[in-house]
Amino acid sequence: MSDPEPIVIAIDGPSASGKSTNSKIIAARLGYVYVDTGAMYRTLAWYALQAGTEVTNAAAVEALCRDWPAKLVRRGDSIWLEVDGFFPEQEIRSAEVSAVVSHVAQVPFVREWMKERQRSCVQFGNLVMEGRDITSNIFPDTPHKFYLHASAEVRQARRDADGVKENLAARDQRDSTRKAAPLKVVEGATVINNSGESPEETSARIIALVQGS
């Protein structure tokens, strides 16, 4: 008898929609492995800045991605990309990286490279994976698809509280209009507006839907 296929809970949404906070809570409560795909793109963006690569030059970013020394690593109950054995956990959250990551994420080769690695995360077991194209592009066949959202005011307040400077409107525009795997609500996804909810309330709703399906 073959082992059952790993379960994947896919969570998409724009910046500051609560994806990371809720995904971590859900993964911890269910004993699943947490995957922040946005951190993977941020890691490449950080590496591009370190290498002096012009992030608005798609050909240059593609060339960098083809040959960068990155590897998927499980650290505790999370999956991350390490570069030459180093995980830039703090560095990828800088304002400089936030300002350029969407440019890196628009490059078609980068998205295909990430797609291959992100899909391979099932080797680590059941997953809670969050990002912007998980329900549409990475695991479109999972029955557990969620799209988190919140009002622009709430999302900006969350970013400000985190001390992160990010133009959310510009980021949303780039993410939703890019040619490669744009941010969108897919058929079959449960849309959750968590503007007036605590992370505990939102995550409890998602867990109940997963366990009841």
Image: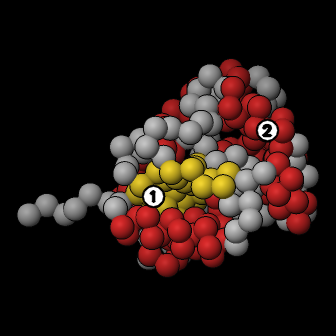
Residue under label 2: 171
Q: Which mark is residue 205?
A: none
Marks 2 and 1, Cα distance to the nearest angstrom?
24 Å
Residue under label 1: 9
Vertical placement of residue 165 versus 73, above or below: above
Q: Amino acid at mark 2?
A: Arg
In the image, what residue occupies the spot 36% across and 67% down?
212
212 with respect to 193 (left or right): left
Where does residue 89 sit, x and y in percent of width and height? 72, 63
Dot 1 falls on a residue whose secondary structure is: strand
Where does residue 20 sit, x and y in percent of width and height? 65, 62
In the image, what residue occupies the spot 83% across and 61% down?
158
Vertical placement of residue 9 versus 57, above or below: below
Name the quadrant of the C terminus. Answer: bottom left
Where does residue 93 sit, x and y in percent of width and height? 79, 57
Vertical placement of residue 46 versus 3, above or below: above
Q: Which quadrant of the figure has residue 209?
A: bottom left
Residue 38 can be seen, yes or no: no
Where does residue 177 sit, x and y in percent of width and height? 69, 26
